Image (tube, rainbow, N blue to C red):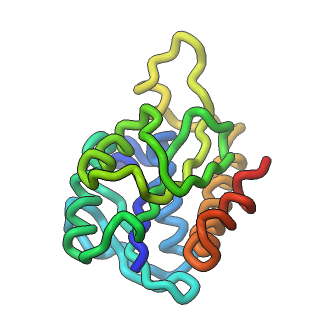
Amino acid sequence: MFIIVGLGNPGRQYAGTRHNIGFGVIEELADAYNINMDINKHKGICGKGIIEGNKVLLVMPQTFMNNSGECVREVLDYYKEDADSLLVIYDDICLDVGRLRLRPKGSAGGHNGIKSIIAHTGTENFKRIRVGVGDKPKNYDLADWVLGHFPKEQESDVRAGIERAVKAVPVIMNRGIEEGMNEFNSK
C-alpha cells in the first residue's frame, strides 16, 4: 500500500494558504479517484482507495504542520509500512508558483513539517513532491508568507501545479520516482 501524505494545517483559516498546498493535492486526488476522506484517526483525516491499480491511503495530518511526523509515524505503525511506501506532498518557497520538484529522498531543507517527519520516522529516505509557492519578498516574515493566501493573479498557476502533482502520483507509483522526476521536474 502507498501512504500519500499532503502537509498542511487544519482549520478553515488556513484553507488555501501556501502552507496548505499539500492538502489541496490530497483533496484533488480524492476527487479524481473517488476516495472518501472519511477516516478520522492516527491524528489525521484519511481515505482508503485505489489509484490506477494501487492501494493507497491518503492522509492529511491534523497535528499542525510542525508536528506532522506524529501522524505519519502512527499511520506507518498501524499499517505496518515503512518509509519506502511513503510519498509526502508539500509546499516549497524555493520554487516558482506551481512548479514541481520530485525527489526520492533528502533533507528537510528548512521545512518544519518535513523535519518532524524525519524526526519521527528516523529517515530522510521517503519520496516527495514539492509544489512551488514562490519565494517570500525581502523583509517579509516567513511564517506570514507561508500562512498567507495566493493572490488572484497566481490562481491559475496554483491550480496547474496541483493538477500536475495529481498526475505525478500514479507515475511515481507505477513507473518509479526516477521516471516521475524526468517527466515533472522539467521547466
Q: Residue 133 in the image: x percent, y percent? A: 59, 39
Relative depth, front residue between 23 and 155: 23
Which residue is found at the position 48% from the left and 46% from the top? Answer: 106
Q: Where, quadrant-wise, is the N terminus in this rendering?
A: bottom left
Q: Is residue 41 left or right of residue 93?
A: left
Question: Residue reaching furthest top?
Answer: 139
Which residue is found at the position 59% from the left and 19% from the top? Answer: 137
**75 above or below 186?**
below
Classify residue 142 by image quadrant: top left
Which residue is found at the position 42% from the left and 55% from the top? Answer: 125
**172 above or below 161?**
below
Relative depth, front residue between 186 and 12: 186
Q: Is residue 100 visible?
A: yes
Q: Residue 164 in the image: x percent, y percent? A: 67, 60
Q: Residue 108 in the image: x percent, y percent? A: 42, 40
Q: Residue 32 in the image: x percent, y percent? A: 57, 76
**169 above or below 148?**
below
Question: Residue reaching furthest right?
Answer: 187
Classify residue 172 by image quadrant: bottom right
How many labels were placed on the picture?
0
Q: Is residue 10 visible?
A: no
Which residue is found at the position 20% from the left and 73% from the top? Answer: 78
Relative depth, front residue between 97 and 56: 56
